[in-house]
Amino acid sequence: MDASYKEVTSFKFQANLLFAESVLQEKKIPFKSKGGALFKLFVKEEDYSRALEVIYNLNLDESEVDPESDGYIAGYEEWADKRYVNGYFTGGVIPRWMYSKVYAQYYGIFIIASSIFYFFVILNDGDASTYSNIDFSWGVSIPILTYIGYFICGILLIIRGFKSQK
């Protein structure tokens, strides 16, 4: 290290050193740093008082961090244990409204009713006359097959809703 540089402070954490370096760089104060057990910050002798004031005003927290304080490790362990379990959300299990049988019944009825409605809208094609002149091209048959699929899903949801738990 050059003799013209003087140690301003030392940090326990490298993140604090990097932040202090970025602030000193913005203030155009030349510096050097050195790592090890403690992360040391050096500035030139003539910039020492200015750099000391800047670093003091940063109010960096150098206190030890308790890994259990925020539950970070527990949350990570939960995620690691349950990440391949289908339907498991970190922080708990699937919300009740997503697997409730009552919702399955109502949503199944809604899907059946809407699929029947749209099926007749496609068949009618906006014309109130008969259904005898329908052209079953790809433009009509794909939506019809889609709404038949919705109808089947609605029936399956209703069956699931009324099925008794064992």
Image (cartoon, rainbow, N blue to C red):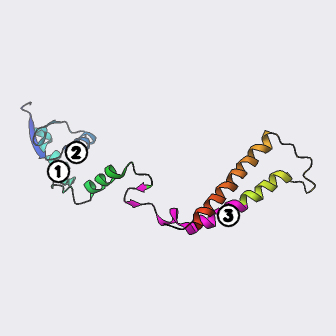
- Foreground tag (1 vs 2): 2
Asked whether 120 or 53 is in front, the reply is 120
Left or right, 56 with respect to 114, comes to: left
- Upstream in the sequence, badge 1 or badge 2? 2
Percent coordinates x, y for residue 19 in the rendering: 24, 45
Percent coordinates x, y for residue 78 in the rendering: 31, 54
Amino acid type at circle 2 is Ala
Residue extending farthest top: 2
Left or right, 120 with respect to 90, comes to: right
Q: Which mark is residue 105?
A: none
Percent coordinates x, y for residue 144 in the rendering: 76, 48
Residue extending farthest left: 3
The residue at the point 62 percent across, 58 percent down is 156
Amino acid type at circle 3 is Phe
Percent coordinates x, y for residue 50 in the rendering: 17, 46
Q: Which residue is mark 1?
A: 53
Q: Which residue is mark 2?
A: 15
Left or right, 26 with respect to 128, comes to: left
From which residue to which does the magenta span run?
88-113
Question: Disc 1 versus disc 2: distance between alpha carbons?
Answer: 19 Å
Q: Which mark is residue 110?
A: 3
Check disc 3: other Cα within 10 Å, few if <14, some if 14-19, many if 20+.
few
| Residue 110 colored in magenta in the image | yes
The residue at the point 70 percent across, 56 percent down is 151
Relative to 31, is 68 above or below?
below
Image quarter for residue 69? bottom left
Asked whether 119 or 27 is in front, the reply is 119
